[in-house]
Amino acid sequence: KVPSENGVWERRTTLPAPMFSRNEFSIWGFLKKCIGMELSKITMPIVFNEPLSFLQRITEYMEHTYLIHKACTRSDSIERMQLVAAFAISAVASQWDRTGKPFNPLLGETFELTRDEEGYRLISEQVSHHPPISAFYSESLNQNFSFHGSIYPKLKFWGKSVEAEPKGTMTLELSKHREAYTWTNPMCCVHNVILGKLWIEQYGTVEIVNHSKKKHRVIYGKWTECVYSIEPKVYEANKKAEKKSGGDSKKHKQEQSTGGDDADEMPDVQETVTMVPGSTLLWRVAPRPPNSTQMYNFTNFAMTLNELEPGMIGVIAPTDCRLRPDIRAMENGDIDTASREKERLEEKQRAARRERAKDEEEWSTRWFQQGNNPYTGAADWIYKGGYFDRRYPHLPDIY
Ligand code: CLR
């Protein structure tokens, strides 16, 4: 809460303390005791965490919301589609090099993000504990769009790597244009959990469906870097010419990470996207802040997520992640308190579950209800409304 020189409050650009060194800790030394166990049930030592809840981590999808605002201003549906595609890709850019494990949200935990200056607000809730499911709903303050979905991160342990499949549908509705887009997020793989340096890869096909359109543009680029759009004919012609001239006709196949004893080398992050002449740039990633490497490789956006802004206390819901004492202690560099508090909260959650079982009481979610996606029919979690009326009686005491 540091007021800047002219007395206006500004969002922080760093965390209160640098991260704890992970050098003396081997993930493998820990994980090998857990082979065959279901990964979501394993409690990892807290040094492998980052001081954000999973609800906050998925809110990073919102970092480049300006792309949706821009899409809303376009009258041409093809231009809108390109910007939506850029949004879907840019939404996962912040995951690059982010190998810290976010805190598992407690059942009923919520996270609110109101960004007046970026013209949107978001509410998310942990709606299921086993399996872990997080639902979110965001809307622009000028009623131009809503973006919502649910994420069930299905984790698989492959030996050398951990693979996360973010199950769940993303839905973007542009109300003025009466358009709805849906897509699913790419797979995420954390390499070298046994030896070598941890690094993150995201891959797989992300098909963005505007439920009424044919192919008009080719969109290409890299999730860590930038996205371009181009006329399909120009793109194909260029590829042909490139093949003829024997130019870099693309790419080593990603080898399966189960084989071999050596570490999977992390590709160099250089400017690797070659721009095809005639392309328009849709999005480019911003550089990470200078202190990022000591701060869990956070982006500027991520740095701000757990900040308690002036006037927030007593206004945000008492279940909000920012009020979790374990995450707070960790971001302050107090790892012992963080670890103790984490255990206390998890035990409190178990005790509450036992109580409910005794009374044969079912857990009821607060802001979302189970339903079907209106466009794809897939199982989904639908926002019930009401969070921003700011009446929070009878919320569970989870901290
Ligand atoms: C990536 C973006 C997706 C949603 C999603 C689902 C699962 C997340 C993943 C994201 C990021 C990486 C992640 C993973 C679950 C576990 C893994 C947080 C947010 C961490 C890095 C694993 C750490 C464990 C090692 C230290 C062994 O759309």
Image (cartoon, rainbow, N blue to C red):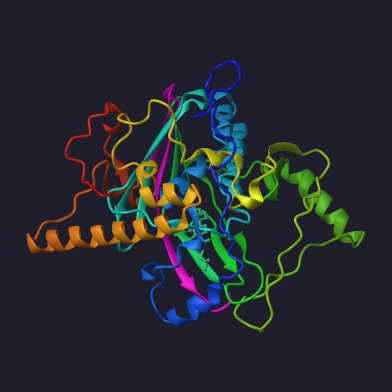
Front residue of 173/200: it is 200
Q: Is residue 39 above or below residue 61?
A: below
In the picture as drawn, the residue positioned furthest to the top comes out as 6
Left or right of 268? Residue 127 is left
Q: Is residue 124 visible?
A: no
Residue 144 among those drawn in magenta: yes
Left or right of 108? Residue 342 is right
Q: Residue at x 57, y 49 (%)?
A: 92
Spot occupied by residue 141 in the image (x, y as percentages of width and height): 43, 24
Residue 327 among those drawn in magenta: no
Spot occupied by residue 107 in the image (x, y as percentages of width and height): 28, 53
In the picture as drawn, the residue positioned furthest to the left comes out as 359
Front residue of 7/108: it is 7
Q: Main secondary structure of the magenta part?
A: strand
Spot occupied by residue 386 in the image (x, y as percentages of width and height): 26, 31
Q: Quadrant of residue 69?
A: top right
Q: Residue at x 45, y 46 (%)?
A: 56
Q: Is residue 197 above or below residue 321?
A: below
Front residue of 396/325: it is 325
Q: Which contiguous range is marked in magenta?
A: 137-160
Left or right of 26? Residue 120 is left
Q: Is residue 364 above or below residue 187?
A: above
Front residue of 363/218: it is 363
Instruction: Report how many numbered discs are placed on residues in the image.
Output: 0
Q: Is residue 229 visible?
A: yes
Spot occupied by residue 18 in the image (x, y as percentages of width and height): 58, 50
Q: Quadrant of residue 28?
A: bottom right
